[in-house]
Amino acid sequence: MNLLEFQAKGLFARHGIAVPKGATWPDLPDGVEGYVVKAQIPAGGRGKSGGIHFAETAAEASAAAEALDGSTIGEHRVERVYVEQRLDIARELYLAVVIDRDRRCRTIVASPDGGVDVEQVPHDRILKVPVEPLLGIRTFVIDRVVRFLAPPPEAAKTLAATVRALHDMALGEDAELAEINPLAVTAAGTVVAADAKVVLDKRARHRHPEWKDLSAPAEGTEFERAVATAGGVAAEMDPNGDVVAVVSGAGLMMASLDALVDMGASMRCVVDMAGTPFGEAPGLVGVFQAVATLKPRVTFINAYFHTALADNVARSMANAYAKAPLGGRIVLRLVGRNAEEGRALLTPLGFEAHGDLEAALKAVIAAQRQTD
């Protein structure tokens, strides 16, 4: 879950990381001098895209927030605006805790050159310190990070506490990424998270009942969101493509895509139906409804099940097709226990059913050519 800034700062505050006073518009933070008005979208680079404005008075802040609300920045519509205290920043640092999958541990990433152009920072100005999972974050690791960031002496102790708190938050909240850019050192020597980016591992939701009211903003195209709502995963490619591939599993999805493209298929999108054939509504019906809106010339359904009964999957497909008919040609490859019965069930509905992958792929290409 890619959280919005105000959600991430709420987590920071609960874990003892200082954040500016803030409120979601139409509310405004109390007792501040100067405001920063920020569009809440799941993307970076808001400052360069017109998503951040500065205001001196409450009236100016409200006017800026009203202008941002409902606007579009890049591919994202602004559904929320966050207004917070404007800081008197003396230095901007960069601090993050990320999962290093090669080392199989969390790694602290720090730079004394934080801000909007952190991507351009030279490698020798970036420190990466892995944290041993069995030992946890040790004092010498924190000291190394603080020395590298070289804050003013009066800010060193608070910075050290922030490094520890960010690591502990990432660990305790099952965060794949916890990033502060910039981590502001104010003229008064305080250390404050001026911005926040947190990506939570949604697979850990069962460990966090407190997440029940925490939802990630909608991402992806309208079609991708519709498939996600149904319980699947989709990736759009060429809006002018002819073929939609609906498959059982992410690995098979990539293999099917590679094979089809190699054979010359013009791909519109690919869909992993995941567990939708076995779940509750909208389930596979929702997937078929989303695919139907694309009006593909050819739909290729590639379903391979090791343990599930293929005839039960076929019944789920038949039910979905009855409620959401797919236009164009439908080529099916169905493999698994009772697959022959499943293919026989779907053939009368117009599915061109195969058990052999190569034959199914050739049928897709032939169907595409016949519709050109």
Image: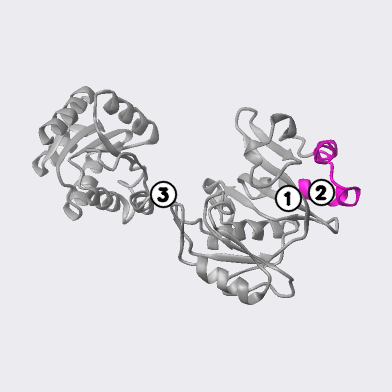
The amino acid sitting under disc 1 is: Leu
Badge 2 is on which residue?
159
Residue for badge 3: 220
Magenta segment boundaries in residue numbering? 138-165
Q: Tell me if residue 336 is in the magenta stretch.
A: no
Q: Nearer the viewer, residue 194 or 166?
A: 194
Q: How is the image coloured?
A: one colour
Reply above or below: 92 against 246. Answer: below
Q: Can you name the residue that lies furthest to the left here?
A: 348
Identity of the residue drawn at 33% across and 43% down: 273
Residue at position x 51%, y 58% in the image: 215
**Residue closest to the eye, 368 or 84:** 84
Q: What residue appears at the point 33 percent right and 50 percent down from the top-left corner?
A: 223
Q: Are marks 3 and 1 in contact (CB under 8 Å)?
A: no
Is residue 365 positioned above or below 220 on the image? above
Q: Residues within 10 Å of mark 2 (few under 14, many from 20)?
A: many
